[in-house]
Image (cartoon, rainbow, N blue to C red):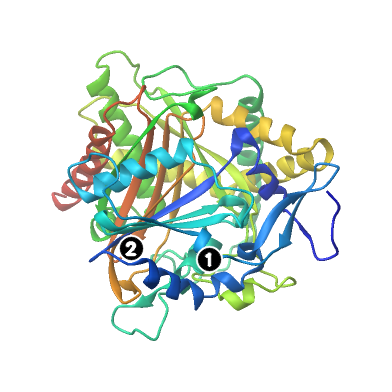
Amino acid sequence: MGIENDDEPLTPAGRLFIQPATHQIINCALGLERPIGFDEVLSVVSDSLMIKHPRFTSLLVTDNHGREYWRKTDLQLNRHIILHSDPVGEADNDEAAVNDYLADLTVSTPLSHDKPLWEIHILSAHKSLVLRLHHALGDGISIMSLMLTLCRKLDDPEQTPTIEPLISSTRSSPRRLKTGEKFSKVVKMIWFTLIYLFDFMSRCLWVRDRKTVVRGGEGVELWPRKLSTATFSLDDMKTVKNAVNNATINDVLFGIISSGVSKYLDKRSPNSHEEGLQITGVALVNLRPSPGLQDMKELMKKNTKIGWGNKFGIMLLPIYYHKKGSDPLMYLKRAKKMIDGKKLSMEAFLSYQIGNFVMSWFGPKWASLLNNRIICNTTFTVSNIVGPREEFTIAGIPVTYLRTTSSSLSHAITMHMLSYAGKADLQILVAKDLIPDPDNLAKCFEDALLEMKEAVVQK
């Protein structure tokens, strides 16, 4: 296929997300107070910035040399809005039915390339909307920003929802470092960077997590999936966060995951894991500036400093198995210590540079092979996106929950946390042949937070 003058090349990360082994579609579910109709959705989308965005009105095309481009096309909205009037699946409640529907989408339902790579599914019987957006269109923050332009604040229908900048509430203005402190910080940065870079490269080649009941591997991305939700109170997470100096919500989340996985392993296979067993997670770190909910008109400019698209590095985040009876807050303290070292290092930046080098010199297949190798040698994927604090509506209908998940990978566990209106929902996508009881795993995570909160209150 020949290339036209207005065609825009995919970003390196966009090319990665269309490869079979690392193919990624974001599935975002919105729960509603009442069912929404096809015409209501059509009206909202027709008046939105979404259909003015170049990526959402372009086809994915490939030239004669195998290079991918975005090509503008005429948008036919009726092809992008899919109505399911009847119940989907056999679950006994709406939220479980939506989760089952999402789980099936993560494995068996790609997006058609004969139209722009997004869809909106209306699940009328379950009072839900599902937005499906190919990850090649942009990163999570960009897509969240665009999705929220479809919505309005519950208490101010003229305004779109907002997301505050990702700045810890515990941090004040940084004090001026003394010369000795600056030198110490630089030495630590170099030390941690060398350690984590070696770990990253070894994971690409030969080092892998030990086999456990929660670890996947090559080919697991094709196995059937189940999806469960762990729901956390943001106030509870903040209570725990404030118990440890300079801790963040991400630290608390990782403490919850570490404690919850240990609990789950004790239930599934008691006395079969050694104390301190390492279980490694993978997180994609957004390297673009993310100052809260970004202005769409600014993001849509080609020469903006923020820019639209995908620019991310990989960070390896190890947790450790500990038997019952461990101090709940120790999971948070260990998570914070590990994450502080990661933040001080250049692991995410250098992993991006390595991936960009492989993509530029060897092409997307080799870049995908590199990323898939890391996934196969680790145990789980995790992400956390800050959502709106205030409640909002779509087509005048209040939104009761906001959740996201993505296409299955070689991991047996993929977790995505998204906060909304005082709570955070962690979507736990599992390979059901390896983890047949994800509701039990979700309960382990919820119990982990409650135990940490109880430990704080009793102090």
Rendered residue at 53%/61% (across/down): 143
Residue placed most toward the observer, 44 or 307? 44
- Above-or-below relation of 43 to 324: below
Expressed as whole percent of the image width and height from the top left, the position of residue 434 reads 36, 22
Circle 1 sits in a helix, a strand or a loop, which is it?
helix
Against 231, residue 204 (above or below) is: above
- Residue type pointed to by label 2: Tyr
Q: Residue 121 sits in which quadrant?
A: bottom left
Looking at the image, can residue 195 be seen?
no
Quadrant hosting residue 358: top right
Disc 1 residue type?
Leu
Mark 1 sits on what residue? 77
Residue receiving disc 2: 420
Residue at 53% over, 66% down: 77
Task: State which tag comes first along the sequence, 2 or 1.
Answer: 1
Position of residue 179 in the picture relative to residue 320 (left or right): right
Q: Is residue 442 left or right of residue 248?
A: left
131 vs 357, left or right, is: left
Q: Is residue 158 visible?
A: yes
Q: Callout 1 environment at 10 Å: few (<14), some (14 to 19), or many (20+)?
A: some
